Amino acid sequence: MSGLKAYVSVDLEGLPGVVSGTMLSPWSSQFSRASKIVTKIINAVADELFKSGFSEVVVADSHGLMTNIEYTELDGRVAVIQGYPRPLSMITALDGGFSAVFYVGYHTAAGTTHGAFDHTYSGRAFAEIRINGVRVSEYIINSLCAGEYSVPVAYLAGDDYLKDEVEKYTPWVVFTPLKRGVSRYAAFYYGLDRVMEAVRRDVNTAASRVKRGEVRVLSWSKPLRVELTLRDSLIADVLEEKFKRVDAYTVYFEAESAREALATIELVAMVAYGVDSFKSALK
């Protein structure tokens, strides 16, 4: 099978060695360590995909300002998408030309007990997001969007608490646990060499499933009912005329597609940022 094309979406909070807020943004004291970790792991993922017969690997740098991968150290065969904001966030430029999606460094959904850095798209905005009554992570939302392009999900590497989602909703996906949350800012993980060995092994397995046609798309019944539990009732006050309100902290809307749902979630996150900035400016 020739012409295989991989889309790799990479986050930071689900990676081993990343447990503190001091690692999550360019102005943080330990960010350089996280940047080294993500670059090493992505290079290993890409190398294994090329060895497995993929002719093209596109990596979407998808945490925070989305400039986490050290470009000067990136495998030269890889195409990379960096920068924020951008359309459809973590899956920008994904289309039907890709053979499969591979997720690396993904964290648990907002509201997961002991999940390291648990959040869904915006920790500032959302205490929980539910779609069709199911609490969802970024993994599920992005996979639903990929499904609308007929792109199957093949691989997920991240917090071990994501395993339940994989087994329940995408059992064909190969899962590599990179860490296990102990608290929001603590996790258990093995040394990087051992982690990289597991990643290479499992990416190879996932690639083999893609070549054999054993991976599938994720699709849920529509319209999608998207329920947003917000962290600040003022955000709900601002949204009230455009959304249906459930209570002081919760609003919901219906979307005809996962892409519409994601775009709306991103818009609400921006509104939440504006509300937070407004409150900070009051003196």
Image (cartoon, rainbow, N blue to C red):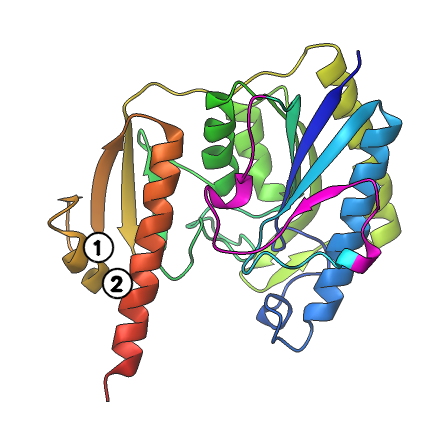
Along the horizontal axis of the image, is 275 left or right of 68? Answer: left
Residue at x 64%, y 16% (from the top left corner): 215
Residue placed at 39% from the left, 30% from the top? 258
Q: Which residue is mark 1?
A: 249
Using the rendered image of the protein, determine whether residue 201 is visible from the camera's viewpoint.
Answer: no
Where is the N terminus found, in terms of image quarters?
Answer: top right
The residue depicted at 33 percent of the width and 50 percent of the height is: 267
Mark number displayed over residue 232 = 2
Q: Where's residue 274, x and y in %? A: 30, 66
Name the element at disc 2.
loop
Is 176 left, or right, of 191 in this rendering?
A: left
Whether residue 91 is in magenta: the answer is yes
Residue 225 magenta: no
Image position, residue 226 (x, y; %): 29, 36
Residue lying at the far left of the rendered structure: 241
Tell me which segment is drawn in magenta: 72-96
In this rendering, does residue 136 appear at all? yes
Q: Is residue 11 left or right of residue 203?
A: left
Amino acid carrying mark 1 in the image: Tyr
